[in-house]
Image (cartoon, rainbow, N blue to C red):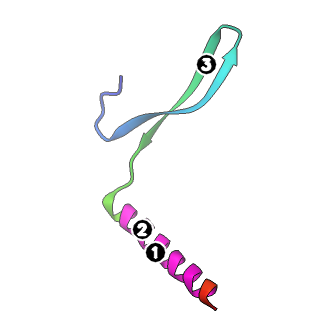
Amino acid sequence: MIQQKGYSLVPISLYFKRNFVKIELGIGRGKKLYDKRREEAKKDAQKKIERALRSK
């Protein structure tokens, strides 16, 4: 169990071997609010560019 706040346990891959399943796990930390805003701004800009190219 993860005890530290802000971290998530993420399954990376699954392996099936006979009657067993092996799981590769990773520990990840979420994005900060400013990172999310930056990504959203990039997506909006890309959408505007694609719309402009389609209309021409």
Check disc 3 and give the amino acid type.
Answer: Lys
Q: Which mark is residue 35?
A: none
Please identify the quarter of the rendering in which residue 55 is found.
bottom right
In the rendered image, residue 49, in percent from the top left (x then y), is placed at: 56, 82
Where the N terminus falls, by quadrant? top left
User: Is disc 2 surrounded by few (<14), some (14 to 19) or many (20+) residues within 10 Å?
Assistant: few
Give the CA separation, mark 1 to mark 2.
6 Å
Mark 1 and mark 3 in contact? Answer it, CB < 8 Å: no
Residue at 30 percent across and 33 percent down: it is 4
Q: Which residue is mark 2?
A: 40
* N-term mark: 1 or 3: 3
| Region rendered in magenta | 35-53
Indicate the secondary structure of the residue bearing disc 1: helix
Please identify the quarter of the rendering in which residue 9 is found.
top left
User: Is disc 3 surrounded by few (<14), some (14 to 19) or many (20+) residues within 10 Å?
Assistant: few
For the residues carrying marks 1 and 3, which lies nearer the camera in this image? 1
Left or right: residue 24 versus residue 37 is: right
Check disc 1 and give the amino acid type.
Answer: Asp
Q: Which mark is residue 22?
A: 3
Which one is nearer the viewer's eye here, 24 or 53?
Answer: 53
Residue 27 sits above or below residue 55 on the image: above
Left or right: residue 28 versus residue 53 is: left
